[in-house]
Amino acid sequence: MKIKDVMQSSFIMYIVCVGGHWITTNMYAQLCTPFDTTGFVKSLFLSQSTHCSLLRWLQQQVCYAMDHAFYLSVSWCVSQVSYRMTNKSLERLRLPTGTMSQTHS
């Protein structure tokens, strides 16, 4: 699998997670915590209902997925930078090709 394909699919999944987070957050705000004069009293009972519990759980799962996607992408970037820096350092330390054969003759 090419790096470009992996990055593209990861970006699409991250956008899906952000969209899921936005949808569940707004649905929870509208359905479970109404913004009107009696909304405070209603939210005492609605927040424990089945659909509100499900929305809260979905929101948490999407946030966990977004966190893990971010950690994974940062780790991958750090590993790529580290790998490239290590290879450049090793290239500077390598002896020219004819050096070893001249010392043993």
Image: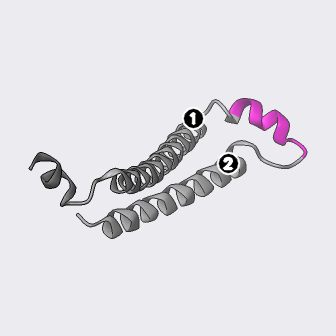
Q: Residues within 10 Å of mark 2 (few under 14, many from 20)?
A: some
Instruction: Say if mark 2 contacts mark 1, CB within 8 Å.
Output: no
For the point 58% across and 52% down, the residue is 21
* Picture quarter with the N terminus: bottom left
The residue type indicated by label 1 comes to: Ser
For the point 77% across and 37% down, the residue is 42
Q: Is residue 39 magenta?
A: yes
Magenta residues span 37-45
Q: Identify the residue under disc 2.
A: 31
Q: In the rendered picture of this protein, how many numbered marks are placed on residues?
A: 2
Q: Nearer the viewer, residue 24 or 46?
A: 24
Q: Is residue 29 magenta?
A: no
Q: Identify the residue under disc 1.
A: 53
On the image, the x and y values in percent for residue 73 come to: 46, 52
Q: SS class of the residue under badge 2?
A: helix
On the image, the x and y values in percent for residue 18 come to: 56, 57
CA gap, disc 2 to disc 1? Answer: 11 Å
Task: Kindly indicate the quadrant of the structure image that contains residue 59.
Answer: top right
For the point 48% across and 49% down, the residue is 78
